[in-house]
Image (cartoon, rainbow, N blue to C red):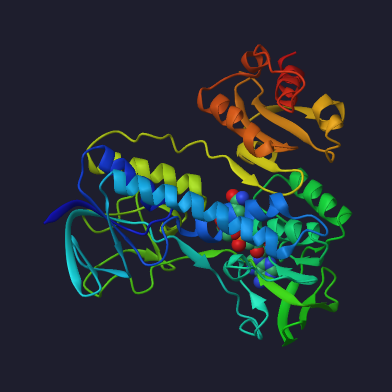
Amino acid sequence: MTYDIAIVGGGPGGYTAAEEAAARGCSVVLFERDLVGGTCLNRGCIPTKALLHDAAPGASFEAIHTRKQAVVAQLREGIERLLKQRKVAVVRGRATITAPGVVECDGKAYEARDIVVATGSLPATIPVPGIDLPGVYTSNDLLEGEGVPLSSIAIIGGGVIGVEFATMYAQLGAQVTVLEATPRILPPLDREIAQRVSMHLKKRGVTVEASARVSGIEGEPGALQVRYADRRGNERVVEAEGVLVACGRRANTEGLFSTEARLELSRGALVCDEAGRTSVEHLWAIGDVVAGNIQLAHVAEAQGRNVVASICGDEPAVEMRVVPSCVYTSPEVASVGITEDEARARGIAVRTGKALTGANGKCLVEESESGYVKLVADAETGAILGAQLVCPRATDLVAELALAISLGCTTAQLARVIHPHPTVSELVSSAARALAR
Ligand code: NAD
């Protein structure tokens, strides 16, 4: 039989596309070489959040990893059930795209009118001596099975993965050092957020070294030394039981295409147009495997819905202009739209309004660490253009602000909405009122 759509990769992009396509009445085959759920469910978003939720000084390392496994298994069973209900044919094995409309897996060829590549990404490595030593891990290794208990850890890379693992290991009482190459951690986020997160990490005993140039790793598991030059150029060494390399992720396309496919790639990632079309007709791509994509599960999911709409000749179902991003530190961090610095760089005149956690009843009751909600609004129209949050449940609150930006809401309109008391969400209305005056 010829399927309407073949999807390679069963992560959030792939399984969402499969579900969407099946719901629209398409016949769908989904190839997955490992476990459905992809990085997000099996080695990323979900396991890290389960661990962050349970990690506390004195917590049993084994117990928190056992619960993590249970959460992951429950969600995975849910996805498998849904795919079955939707009659998606799930083929287990490593798939290769051998010709337009043909996917091979375990010696069998499957034909499809359209193919969607959703193979995601893999942890990137860095070219320094000792990077392959035992005891040097990726986030995959630390999330696998029972995890890796460490009393000290050096983390190379102060991006999202770096700070989330720093938070988790520090919560478990480990000695943590973060070595970040650029002048500040979380480089794409607002400067003030990076300062706050650094401050909170330091308060938990984490050493944060920005502008650190790692030159090599030596030693053996349990006693590794990471050599680096600090911001002043002085040679330094940090000793740790284990090292985590968290320096970004690279597109997973190795061995995916046979030589016949003439595809435009950029550093191994697929070059696509906005709809997800590659340079080969009827071959589409979504998620982390796409060149220049924001590597987030919710972006892959949205693209999964949109690519199926495009294949079916419909308009995109999800607006891709407004993409919230979240970091699960303590307190949480979230951001959507543009920052004050970005507005300035683009020549947009803006006003900003801020509400501090210190004046919020719920934050005080919960003894939350200091933070804020900041809104960035067009100086002339009052339209909300961006929001940055450092506060409890920031990752949930940001959804309201994504909606506000998406609908072109002004600060005056947001200020008119009653927010329940006492809640952290009152920070949003306070910040809006500060601007609406
Ligand atoms: P990242 O791009 O967020 O951060 C990598 C960091 O490593 C950067 O700060 C970079 O400057 C630094 N770096 C690069 N080379 C270095 C070197 N040689 N020495 C020291 N520092 C170096 O990547 P990540 O943290 O690996 O995460 C990968 C992807 O997964 C990102 O796109 C991220 O957004 C996503 N992710 C998202 C979440 C979330 O949404 N909560 C959580 C984890 C990961």
Residue 183 vs 332, above or below: the answer is below
Residues 303 and 418: in front is 418
- Front-most of residues 392 and 237: 392
Q: Is residue 15 above or below residue 102?
A: above
* Residue at x 28% of width, y 43% of height: 86
Total marks drawn? 0
Could you tell me which residue is drawn at 58 percent across and 32 percent down? 399
* x, y percent for residue 384: 61, 25
Residue 308 falls left or right of residue 395? left
Above or below, 419 against 376 in this view is above
Where is residue 266? Give x, y as percent.
41, 65
Q: Is residue 366 visible?
A: yes
List x then y, in percent, for residue 76: 46, 53
Quadrant of residue 433 within the rendered picture: top right
Rendered-image quarter of ligand 1: bottom right
Q: Please name the residue shown 67% across and 55% down the image.
A: 51
Q: For residue 421, what is the image quadrant?
A: top right
Query: Viewed as shown, does residue 95 lie left or right of 76?
Result: left
Q: Quadrant of the C terminus?
A: top right
Please give left or right for residue 186 compared with residue 9 in the image.
right
State the image coordinates of residue 238 (x, y, percent, origin top left): 82, 76
